[in-house]
Image (cartoon, rainbow, N blue to C red):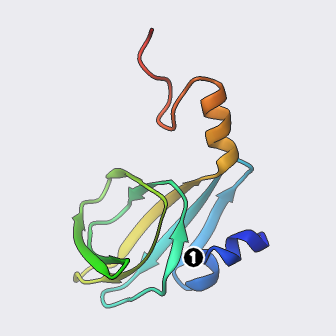
């Protein structure tokens, strides 16, 4: 893990009991996240990411003094803009997700190739 990530409140450093790296290269980092009902994380940052839910769960996400409650089902794939937040499991089941964090080099390469973060755009 590089110093820049630690300075940016890397969730693996701030909440190591919940976030575990499962894959990393120069373009992406994949984190596995697990918790139990009542778990509250400390503030941390995520770059632009895709979240894949492996379980259903309810969470309260807190950012900038505001909160939002979400209920998600297993098997969803969701885009997440870069953000700093902390979360709380407000449901009665554990949370299990994979986060695919995009690195800047990947976005630069996609833009240079004429594709966006979700893949090729419509034909011209």
Coordinates of residue 121 in the picture (x, y in percent): 45, 22
* 36 versus 81 height, above or below: below
Q: Is the C terminus in the top left, top right, bottom left or bottom right quadrant?
A: top left
Q: Is the N terminus in the top left, top right, bottom left or bottom right quadrant?
A: bottom right
* 91 versus 31 height, above or below: below
Residue corresponding to mark 1: 11
* 113 versus 43 height, above or below: above
**Residue at far top of view:** 124
Q: Residues within 10 Å of mark 1 (few under 14, many from 20)?
A: many
Residue at image coords 48%, 87% = 42
Residue at image coords 27%, 71% = 57
Is residue 7 in view from this perspective? Answer: yes
Question: In the figure, is residue 101 to the left or right of 95?
Answer: right
Coordinates of residue 10 in the picture (x, y in percent): 62, 74
Question: In the figure, is residue 121 to the left or right of 66?
Answer: right
Is residue 16 in view from this perspective? Answer: no
Coordinates of residue 106 in the picture (x, y in percent): 65, 42
Residue at image coords 74%, 49% = 26
Residue 21, image quadrant: bottom right
Residue at image coords 45%, 76% = 34
Coordinates of residue 15 in the picture (x, y in percent): 55, 84
Q: Secondary structure at mark 1?
A: helix
Question: In the figure, is residue 69 to the left or right of 107?
Answer: left
């Amino acid at each position: 893990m590089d110093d820049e990530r630690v300075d940016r409140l890397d969730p693996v450093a701030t909440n190591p009991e919940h976030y575990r790296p499962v894959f990393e290269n120069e373009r992406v980092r994949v984190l596995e996240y697990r918790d139990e009902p009542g778990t509250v994380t400390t503030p941390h940052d995520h770059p632009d990411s895709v979240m894949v839910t492996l379980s259903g769960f309810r969470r309260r996400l807190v950012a900038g003094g505001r909160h939002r409650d979400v209920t998600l089902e297993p098997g969803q794939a969701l885009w997440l803009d870069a953000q700093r937040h902390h979360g709380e499991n407000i449901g009665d089941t554990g949370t299990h997700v994979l986060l695919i964090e995009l690195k800047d080099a990947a976005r630069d390469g996609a833009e240079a190739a004429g594709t966006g973060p979700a893949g090729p755009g419509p034909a011209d």
